[in-house]
Amino acid sequence: MAQHIIVGECMVEMSSRGQQTYYQTFAGDTYNTAVYFKRCNSVESIQYLTAIGSDEISEQLLVQMQAEDLATELTLRSSNKTLGLYTINTDEAGERSFAYWRSDSAAKQMLSLLDPTVLGTPKSFFFSGISLGILSDDDKQKLLELANKLKQQGCKIIFDPNYRPKLWVSAERARIWTDKAYALADIAFPGCDDHLTLYGHNNLNEVQQHVVALGVQEIVIKNGEHGIQIFSQGQHCIVPAHRVSKVVDTTAAGDAFNGGYLAARFAGQNEQSAAGFGAKIAAYVIGHRGAIVDKTEMAAFIQANRLW
């Protein structure tokens, strides 16, 4: 089985290209991270755990995943569901607005379709608040139990809260499940915006104290243009955001950072170097349109900026 398992939902993305014109591709928070992780560190094997349909659009996604060199043995098939869909509109400043259609998403079934005995013991197991939020409560519990079992076997558990209010019946329930996930995580990617919305945390210290109290050893706090702050093994460092001459589309900034950071960490880089590399990857991505940018063009940038 793959060295790294990334869990979540990949959706059909319809991004505005002008009045009444949309461009169709595929994206999703953990899928974006998987793609950028693999592009930045091609020697690592990355498996995307999800469920898709048995229809034509699902087949197109499978082809795209294989083109990104992602392992697909854990891309499970639903007989009665398909892919979720979202539209994205971007303003002149690069900020985006979304509309979602998830009611028929096959990814909601992934835990019921999964045979957990096939997972082996990967190096890492990554999921997000969205990965949790789309599931029933029973399947949320199954996902956390699976993460805990893998953790006991030596697998690193990685979590990004990535809070989306519409996926949760209440903020209180979201806080309960998010804290359970944090309590399992070895590496976490909290965002200041998410913590303000979900917990009412007004500053970075409140975010850090909350996550430390839940036992996370490597905390990488994302704070937009204010950069990244890392708390790990009793050490604290600050990595500035990488400046971008023109922001085109901020859709996958955090996902791209996660992918770059993990690619560097599992290549042996320390936390500060990994965050610097992740910031460069995020800056490159937001300078282009779409969550997943052109692979060939990006390859030269990765080669020029990779430290290993």
Image (cartoon, grey):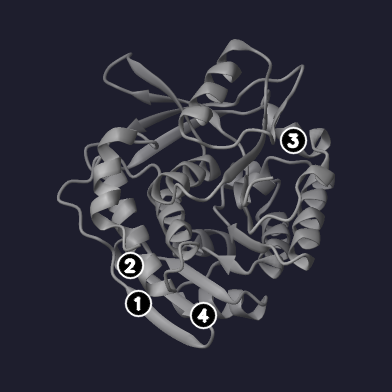
Q: Which residue is mark 3?
A: 110
Q: What is the number of the mark on residue 232?
A: 4
Q: Residue furthest left?
A: 245
Q: Crowdedness of circle 2 by 10 Å Cα count: few (<14), some, many (20+)? A: some
Q: Are marks 1 and 2 in contact (CB under 8 Å)?
A: yes
Q: Quadrant of residue 185?
A: bottom right
Q: Specify the quadrant that holds the N terminus.
A: top right
Q: Quadrant of residue 131?
A: top right
Q: Which residue is mark 1?
A: 238
Task: Using the image as rendered, state which of residue 241 and residue 43 is in the foreground.
Answer: 43
For the point 70% across and 69% down, the residue is: 183
Q: Which residue is mark 2?
A: 227
For the point 66% across and 20% down, the residue is: 82
Q: Crowdedness of circle 4 by 10 Å Cα count: few (<14), some, many (20+)? A: some
Report, in whole angstroms, how far the alpha carbon at label 4 lies from the one at label 1: 12 Å
Q: Specify the quadrant that holds the C terminus.
A: bottom left
Q: Earlier in the sequence, mark 4 or mark 2?
A: 2
Report, in whole angstroms, how far the alpha carbon at label 4 lies from the one at label 2: 16 Å
Report, in whole angstroms, how far the alpha carbon at label 3 lies from the one at label 2: 35 Å
Residue 161 showing in the rendered view: yes
Report, in whole angstroms, how far the alpha carbon at label 4 lies from the one at label 3: 33 Å
Report, in whole angstroms, how far the alpha carbon at label 3 lies from the one at label 1: 37 Å
Residue kind at label 3, given as amino acid type: Met
Dot 4: element: strand
Q: Are marks 4 and 3 in contact (CB under 8 Å)?
A: no
Please tell me whether mark 4 or mark 2 is closer to you in this view.
4
Looking at the picture, does residue 88 appear above or below residue 32?
A: above
Looking at the picture, does residue 104 appear above or below residue 263?
A: above
Q: Earlier in the sequence, mark 1 or mark 2?
A: 2
Dot 3: element: helix
